[in-house]
Every structure is written in C-alpha cells, then in structure tokens.
Amino acid sequence: MRAPSPPDLPARRAHSSDSGAHAELDATDLTWAGEVDIAHAHLTEWVVLPATLDHVAGRGATLIDVAFDGLVCPNLDLRDASLRRVRIRGGRIGALDLQGARVADVILEDVRVDYLTVAGARLESVLLANSRIRSLDMPLATVEDTRIQGCEIGELDAREMRAKSLDLRGADIARIRNIQSLRGATVAPAQADAMAAAFADALGIRVEA
C-alpha cells in the first residue's frame, strides 16, 4: 500500500487574507475569517493558518500542495473538488463534505470531525490518523491505498463502496452499516470476531444458541 505524499510547500510564501471564488493563488499563507468562498478556485502551495470560521464553500475547487492547520469550522464543503497532496491537521470540523471529489495523497490527522462524507468520491493514497470521526459516510466511493489508523469512528456506512485496498486494522469502529460492502478491505482478527454476527446477518445466516 502506497503511503500518501505530504504537501510540497516552498519555504518562502506570501501572506494574505484575500481569496474568493475562481481565484488563483500560489505560495501563500492564508488567514481566513467568517464565511469563505473558494468555489472553483485553483489554489497551490498554500497554508491555511489556524482560524475559527463560519463556513467554507469550496465546491469544484482544485487544491494542490495545501495544508490546513488547526481549522475550526462547522462546514467545510469540498464537493466535486480535486485534492492532491493535501493535509488537514488539528482542529474541529462539523461536516467535511467530499462528495464526488477526487482525493489523492491526502492526510487527515489529529482532527475531530462530526460527519465526514466521501460519497461517490475517488480516494487514492489517503491516510486518516489519530482522529475522532462520529460518522464516516462512504457510499459509492472508490477506495484504493487508503488506511485508517488510531481513529475512533462512531459509525461507518460502506453502502456500495468499491475498495481495492482499504486498511481498517487501526480503526476502532462502533458500528458498521452495509457490512457486505467491505469487500476488498482488511481488518484485524479481533475486528473480524467482533463483526461475526453482522457478517452472518448480511449472508442471511441465523446464529442461535
């Protein structure tokens, strides 16, 4: 399984608080506040400094070599976006929406997320590490070279997910919905034991004493 590459950030970057829909920014440290609109923007080699925001609208944006540090935001909307070599580290996010996104070489670490959806997205070389995710929604996602380690997940919905290589061995998952869609995933023996009743139910097997 290929590990994700971290963002490639230049040592010298400009500083700005200005961005917007359809903007093109590179080599920039951004200080955001309030409502942020980066829909369909093209942003490369930039760092979002720690901030508490109201909302980020980033549908259709292209993010390449980007780092989010200590972001606190109720809604980070990146539907249909393209993310390559992106790191989200620290902070608290209410809803992180990656529906339909193309996600490659992305690292999510030390973050608390209430709701993370990658419905219909394509994930390649993604790492979720040392995070708490209340609900992870993955219906119709295509997943390759993705690893979840040191994470607490309240609920995982795998409905019609297509996984080529998904490593769940480092995840503590309280509940899995549509467990039959985990084909292609790797779990630890203890996890398989805990899932035995759910596997049986998915296959229509009654387990009785």
Image (spheres, rainbow, N blue to C red):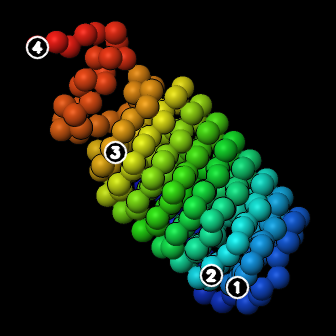
Q: Earlier in the sequence, mark 1 or mark 2?
A: 1
Mark 2 vs mark 4: give the one in front: 4
**Local secondary structure at mark 4:** loop
Q: Amino acid at mark 3?
A: Ile
* Residue depicted at 25% across the width and 10% down the height: 206
- Mark 1 → mark 2, Cα distance in angstroms: 7 Å
Q: Where does label 2 land, which residue?
A: 51
Q: Quadrant of the C terminus?
A: top left
Q: Where does label 1 land, which residue?
A: 31
Q: Amino acid at mark 1?
A: Thr
Name the disc covering residue 126, or none: none
Whether tag 4 and tag 1 are in contact, CB under 8 A, the answer is: no
Does residue 189 appear to the left or right of 148 in the view shown? Answer: left
Name the disc covering residue 173, or none: 3
Q: Earlier in the sequence, mark 4 or mark 1?
A: 1
Does residue 205 appear to the left or right of 32 in the view shown? Answer: left
Does residue 102 appear to the left or right of 162 in the view shown? Answer: right
Mark 4 vs mark 1: give the one in front: 4
Name the disc covering residue 209, or none: 4
Q: Is residue 188 above or below residue 154?
A: above
Report if residue 132 is visible in the image.
yes
Q: Amino acid at mark 2?
A: Ala
- Mark 3 → mark 2, Cα distance in angstroms: 30 Å
Whether tag 1 and tag 2 are in contact, CB under 8 A, the answer is: yes
Q: Earlier in the sequence, mark 4 or mark 3?
A: 3
**Local secondary structure at mark 1:** loop
Q: Is residue 199 above or below residue 17?
A: above
Viewer-side residue, 75 vs 145: 75
Q: Earlier in the sequence, mark 3 or mark 1?
A: 1
In the rendering, at what x and y percent does residue 10 appear?
A: 63, 81
Mark 4 nearby-residue class (10 Å; few <14, some 14–19, many ≥20):
few
Q: Earlier in the sequence, mark 2 or mark 4?
A: 2
